[in-house]
Amino acid sequence: MAPQQDGIDFPALGFGGGTLGDPDAVIPEAQAIATLECAYEAGIRHFDTAPWYGNTKSEHRIGTFLRSLPSHEDCIVTTKVGRVYFRPEDPQAFKASPWMARWKGGLPFDLRFDYSHAGIMRSYEDSLMRLGVNRVAALTIHDLDLKHQKDEDGVAKAFRALEAGRGFQALADLKRSGEIEAIGAGINHIGMIPRFLERFDLDYAILAMPYTLLDQAALEKELPLCVEKDVKVIIGAVFASGILATGSKGAPLYGYKPAAQDILDRVQGIEAICRRHAVPLPAAALQFPLAHPAVVSVIPGANSPDQVRGNIDCIGHRIPDTFWQELKGAGLIQPDAPVPAGGPPI
């Protein structure tokens, strides 16, 4: 992971580590490592994680995998800052906490949000130890938004910690020294990219939910601004937290909650067009965002080797131009959304 003078060349397909935090089901350690091994053997080299995923579990698992390699110099490892973890004051009572409820297999560690200089550095150094490496390629400012900070006062407080509290200065110093190659922000909601870019010089944004096959809200302002500012965009939650991978059957998730009827109806409309063109729904979901000039990568999660292989097959699936034209004609994607042309992205 030697520093690159021209920034990080993110590959079109990376590996999102959220699923390795066991959000919905507990998977064995051997399965988690086999999943990462399968990704690496298939040529995937970007591994993105965060302390939040499984309350540090994802970082531990990716670290175990990295240590099994003869060398991980060819890997782009990225993680996130903004949360600091510690032993809960009452470990027994903590079992009923919201943090433990969020991750079915999460580890028993409490957290606080901290975007200050000290908090960023504590988060960074703790991540290095969990990963078992002495540097990562990039750090992403995580979950500075209304949902996670509760209200506008919480968002303003977090921005003050990055500015007056010198949290962003810590990141800038790490980049200047060559310890990291890039600084990013994780974006879950429309309106946050402009707020970040008016304050900070970001290299990339990880956009989760506002630009998928089901929602192109970022087309109006967010993505054009990224093009203007030369900010690379990586799409997280490319399957909209589940439904674009599993389809409309059963009890699919959208936005990490059970899908509402209007979403189910929309997916069923897309599925009908998929059947007519022999296109797997996950293939359309993976390939669609990469057509936008701001988007350089998608990082779907996986918790089994079969899911890894499925993602690779889908991103390489040839989708006819008529498929995208029919989606637009049916009003299922925005008419001005860029769509793939000339074959699969990889």
Image: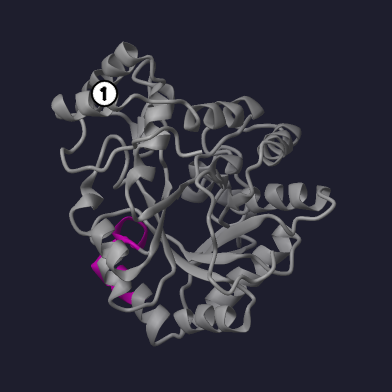
Looking at the image, the residue that sits furthest to the top is 276
Q: Is residue 246 above or below residue 196?
A: above
Q: Is 59 left or right of 216, judged from the image as shown? A: right
Who's the residue at 56% across and 83% down the image?
Answer: 176
Who's the residue at 61% across and 41% down the image?
Answer: 20
Is any part of residue 84 visible from this angle?
no
How far across and down, in percent of the image, does residue 92 sit? 62, 49
Looking at the image, the residue that sits furthest to the front is 342
Viewer-proximal residue among 321 and 327? 321
Give the quarter of the image for residue 44. top right
Q: Is residue 231 above or below residue 336?
A: below
Image quadrant for the N terminus? bottom right
Looking at the image, the residue that sits furthest to the right is 70
Overall secondary structure of the magenta section: helix
Who's the residue at 69% across and 68% down the image?
Answer: 2
How far across and down, in percent of the image, does residue 40 sit? 69, 41
Give the quarter of the image for residue 325. top left
* Amino acid type for the residue under numbered disc 1: Thr
How far across and down, in percent of the image, does residue 22 sit? 58, 38
Q: Which stretch is magenta?
A: 145-157
Dot 1, how many residues are within 10 Å of its Cα: few (below 14), some (14-19), or many (20+)?
few
Q: Is residue 212 above or below residue 58?
A: above
Tell me, yes or no, whether the highlighted magenta stretch contains residue 150: yes
Viewer-proximal residue among 229 and 301? 229
Q: Which residue is mark 1?
A: 322
Q: Is 28 left or right of 23, judged from the image as shown? A: right
